[in-house]
Each structure stands twice: as C-alpha cells, then as structure tokens.
Amino acid sequence: MDESAPTMNIFSLPDVFLRKLMRCVDLRDRMRLRLTCRAFERLVAGTHAGYFYDGGIRQSPRSATFSFNIGTMHFSPIPATDKGFLKVLRMRDRLFNGVEFSYFSLNLDNSITFDFLSNFTENFKISLLTLFVNSTEQLRTYRELMLTFPKRDHSLRLQIFPEVDLLMTLPRMDELYINDYITETGDIIFPWRINSDLFFNLLGKTKKLILSNVILSVEDCEKAVKIVSTAFDSKMVRVQLINSVITSWLHTYNVYQSSKEGQGYGEMEVVTVPETKRRPETLKLRYTNRTNGLSSCISIDGSIWENGDVRCGMTIYKD
C-alpha cells in the first residue's frame, strides 16, 4: 500500500452530509460499523436509519417470547419480560435515533406494555400503523398509543368485541375492522350486533369502516349514504345487514328486483343489476344528493331479493 496516497477522515465531512449518508446504510452495515470504533458507534446511534416499507412486532397468543422486524431484518425470539424489553430498547438506541415506515403493525399478547411500545416507537415516522386487537385490555393499550401519535394514520383490526363504552372513546383513525363470532377466549358464539348509535359514532371517526353485523333501520341506511356522499375525503363503509332492511330501503326509491341498468329513481340510479347465474349476486347503484350534487356509490352483494332474513353485504363509498 502506498502510504503517500491521500486519505480522508470521514468524520471531517459536514454533519449534514454524514446524516444523509447514514440514511443509505442498511441495518446490517450499521451493526458492523458501530463495532469498528467509538466514533462510528456514536455516529450510528445518533443518526436516522432511513426508510423501510414495513416493520412490526408480533407475539403469538400466550407466548413467552415475541419478535420484530425492520424491513427484511428479523429479530427473534425475544423474552416478553422486563429484561427482554430493555435489551430491545438498548439495541434500538445503538442502531439509530429514528426510522421511517410506510406500514408498521402490532399483533401482540397482553404481556407487552404501553411503556415499551411507546419507547420503542419513539422518533418513528409511520404512514399507516396497523393494530391487531385480541383483548379488551390490549385495546386500552393501543388506544393510549393512538392518542400519543395522533398524526399517524391508524388501522385497527379487532378480533374480539370489547366494551361499547371503550369503542365509543376511540380516537379518529384511517381504518377500523371488527370481525365476527369471536370471544376473548377464542370461542365461536352467536354473532353480536352493533346498534345504530355505535355505528354512527364509528362511521364519524373513520375513513374506512368494516363491520360484520349491524342493526340499522331504513332511515339509518339513508343517513349513512348521505354521510358518505358529503365526506370531504374518500370514505367507505361495509356492513352486513338483514336483506329485508336493504330491500325496504331500496323500495323507497322504487328500486326492485325487476329494475334495469341505467334506470334512475329520484336520487338513486341503478348502475349494474345482478347476473342470475352468478353468485354472490351484486347490485350496484349511485346515489346523488339533489341539494348539493354530491354522490356516493353503493354495492350490495348476497341473496338480496330472497324471502326471509338473509345477511347481505352493503358497501357505500365515495368515489
């Protein structure tokens, strides 16, 4: 090696340049760099790790360990104990002081605390935070986390049906899914139903709402369509309803099984009628408010016109 060849001290570069450079260094290289000398150790710990499409923390039900990933780099198994939490937080602090994700998810058991989640996600920039809820206690933890980071888009996916009062106090969010038939012990039960008060509370604070079993009247269907059509941003709601309620509501606009595509009935226009040989049947309509000209699309699938109480899916969305 030519000792007279020019060399450069990387730490003589401007701080702004070094910080931008470190955003391009992947996690494995950051781990290697910090082992070379104290100066690199401080540089790695004090700089942003850059952008990753996804990340998350996962824990199987009643498991004593958990795992997490940042992009394609996975860390597991980690004891779900105070000692394990502290180890993860120390490792995080040694690798970066901030990171950005398009998508980050939490699917956990009850043993992981709010304090750990809050500390772990400090200086995280997340476009969409998806939270899988498996218990009422966990929903309380996630609610606090959502309130801590109000500027994020949140997607909440409930595997159980918690206390109604707790659902009523949830903050605004991007998406809310509530599944059917599941209790906190994992038992399949007769499906619970969401009444109109809770439905409109949830509709008012979500951009995308998916519920499996809702009790709505004809008047409630009309109110929901008007709320969606007058939303400033994109909005969508999908519910499971008894078909007799849906058909009674459609009859107020003179929409029947015999209605044809392109026919208009006041504020309602038939866009697509079901194909008799295709299952499930799908009826598509467009609602246009005469007062303000705002519109929404409606898609109904299932045995819409069948006698008896059959659950059908109805989706209302602003295009």
Image: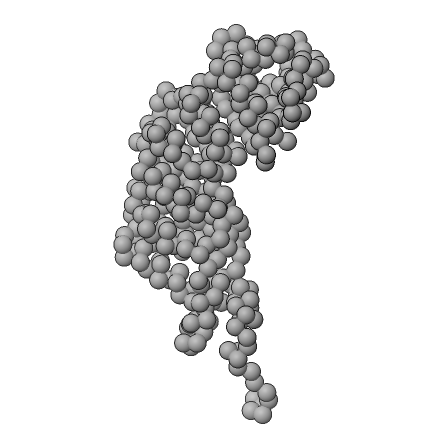
Q: Position of residue 171 (x, y in %)?
A: 43, 38
Q: Residue furthest top?
A: 307
Q: Residue furthest front?
A: 291
Q: In the rendered view, would you say 192 is above or below 114?
A: above
- Give the image quarter of residue 168: top left
Q: Inspect this view and state whether residue 54 appears.
A: no
Q: In the rendered view, would you say 211 is above or below 1?
A: above
Split into 4 quadrants, where in the image is the C terminus?
Answer: top right
Q: Residue furthest right?
A: 262
Between 90 and 147, the residue placed more toward the observer is 147
Residue, x 68% and y 20% (percent of image)? 271
Q: Inspect this view and state whether residue 245 appears.
A: yes
Q: In the rendered view, would you say 74 is above or below 194?
A: below
Q: In the rendered view, would you say 158 is above or below 47?
A: above
Colour scheme employed for the rendering of this structure: one colour
Q: Position of residue 17 (x, y in %)?
A: 56, 71
- Residue 268 relative to residue 115: left or right: right
Residue, x 52% and y 72% (percent of image)? 15
Between 151 and 130, the residue placed more toward the observer is 151
Q: Position of residue 218 (x, y in %)?
A: 52, 14
- Residue 97 relative to residue 111: left or right: right
Residue, x 47% and y 41% (percent of image)? 154
- Residue 35 relative to residue 87: left or right: right
Q: Position of residue 296 (x, y in %)?
A: 62, 26
Q: Residue furthest bottom?
A: 4
Between 159 and 78, the residue placed more toward the observer is 159
Split into 4 quadrants, where in the image is the N terminus?
Answer: bottom right
